[in-house]
Amino acid sequence: MIEQFLGLLVSLLDQTGLLSITAGNILMMFVGAVLIWLALTKKYEPFLLLGIGFACIVSNVPGSDLTAPGGLFYYAFRGVELVIIPPLIFLGVGAMTDFGPMISRPSLMVLGAGAHAGIFIAIVLAKMTGMFTIAEAGAIGIIGGADGPMAIFVTMKLAPHLLPQIAVAAYSYMALMPLIQPPVMRLLTSKAERSIMMTQVRPVTRLERIVFPFVIAIIVNLLLPPVAPLITMLMLGNMLREVLMVERLANTAANEIMNIITITLTVAVGSTMAADRFLTFTTLVIVGLGLIAFLGGTASGVLTAKFMNLFLKEKINPLLGSAGIASVPIAARVAHVVALKENPYNFLIMHAMGPNLAGVFGTAISGGIMLALLGVK
Amino acid sequence: MNIVPMTVPDTLEGAVILSIVDFFLSIVLIYGISFVLMLFPYLNKLGSISDESLKGGH
């Protein structure tokens, strides 16, 4: 009788995940909990970290079918794998974004290219490890562009098997930029440089704002077809915003679509953090290289601005260089906060948005050229 | 001269070539786009659009 009872108990236990839980699962649940703690207490990008952290915890509970083929989180990830989600994110971003700061001071756009040297430092270092092909190294390097949808897009083209690690690294570092960037920015600039105040930008007319998305869409489709889906959707969203007469469509793209896709994407990214796939030496190396890419990009952006100042009569604040990393508007906000600490009257945010927005194009162009040079369409 | 299209080799030298070419080409392209944007103020000579004339759609 007792044996029967115990036998039934064991069968019941077999149905649950209690007997399958590993130390790796517990570690990854702790990692998920840290991401949620950072979002709730430090307010680091809660829109990203809450979904990632939650899905990370749940996907490390054995016994659940959420991440198995046919499960709910599995379908969320299919949206990422099939490159449906990244273009929709860019549609929403375009509908939310005011490109006025970039249009009004196009000379600062070059900071959006200069801040991407981190991508290439990571590519070379990845290849030097001997662990990765050049396509894999390219996918790892694009983490340094600090553009989540672009990182996913390029990774799916170059190294889809590395998507979990690269997506998690890209989104986690984007959320942690307020921690990662300021030490590099302070190390490479003097107090006087950080205190430079920028002159007012010129107003941008409605005609310019409407023409802008068409011009950019044509240029990118002509010169960089590999990244045309993302930039075209970015410009479509922006066009809907700027023409003013389809407010309903622009609002839907900027709000409902963006919110749905953000929930889906963060859950999809977090669901890939299962211990058996994630806790590997390769993941550790990728996460380390991603950090180097971010640090290198921040440094190269600041140094590009300082180099420009050698030739400019009206100096620019070199903190704007670090905003050339694509993470909009996080990088611009970080530059603004660091400048405010030196001079409480130095409001850099609108000036920093120019290079920050240019960084989106910088990452797209870097990614597009990379895909073209590696023979990927 | 017979120029054959090729992709970057999967070696460390290939990674360095890819990085240098990509970095400088992206600066050139970004600078080209910024040059196009520098011409935008001339658009205003063609005419203007007021926000009020656009509002009132759906």
Image: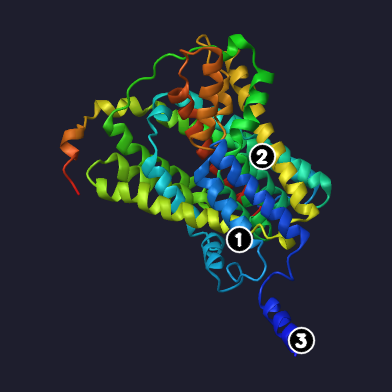
Q: In the rendered image, which quarter is residue B35 located in? A: top left
Numbered tag placed on residue B52 in the rendering:
none
* Whole-number angstrom distance, CA of label 3 to CA of label 2: 64 Å
Instruction: Tell me the residue at 18%/46% (across/down).
Output: B57
CA–CA distance between discs 1 and 3? 35 Å
Q: Earlier in the sequence, mark 2 or mark 1?
A: 1
**Pointer 3 local density, CA inside 10 Å: few below 14, some 14–19, many at least 20:** few
Q: Position of residue A91 (x, y in %)?
A: 41, 49
Check the image and report above or below for A69 versus A160. below
Element under label 3? helix
Foreground: disc 2 or disc 1 = 1
Q: Quadrant of the N terminus of chain A?
A: bottom right
State the image quarter where residue A203 is shown: top left
Instruction: Give the amino acid type for the residue marked by disc 3 in the picture.
Output: Ile
Name which residue type carries label 2. Ile
Residue A372 can be seen in this image = yes
Report which residue position mark 1 lands on.
A58
Q: Mark 2, chain letter?
A: A
The percent coordinates of residue A343 (x first, y second) are: 52, 12
Question: The numbered mark 3 sits on a residue in which chain?
Answer: A
Mark number for residue A2?
3
Q: Tag on residue A119?
A: 2
Mark 3 or 2, closer to the camera = 3
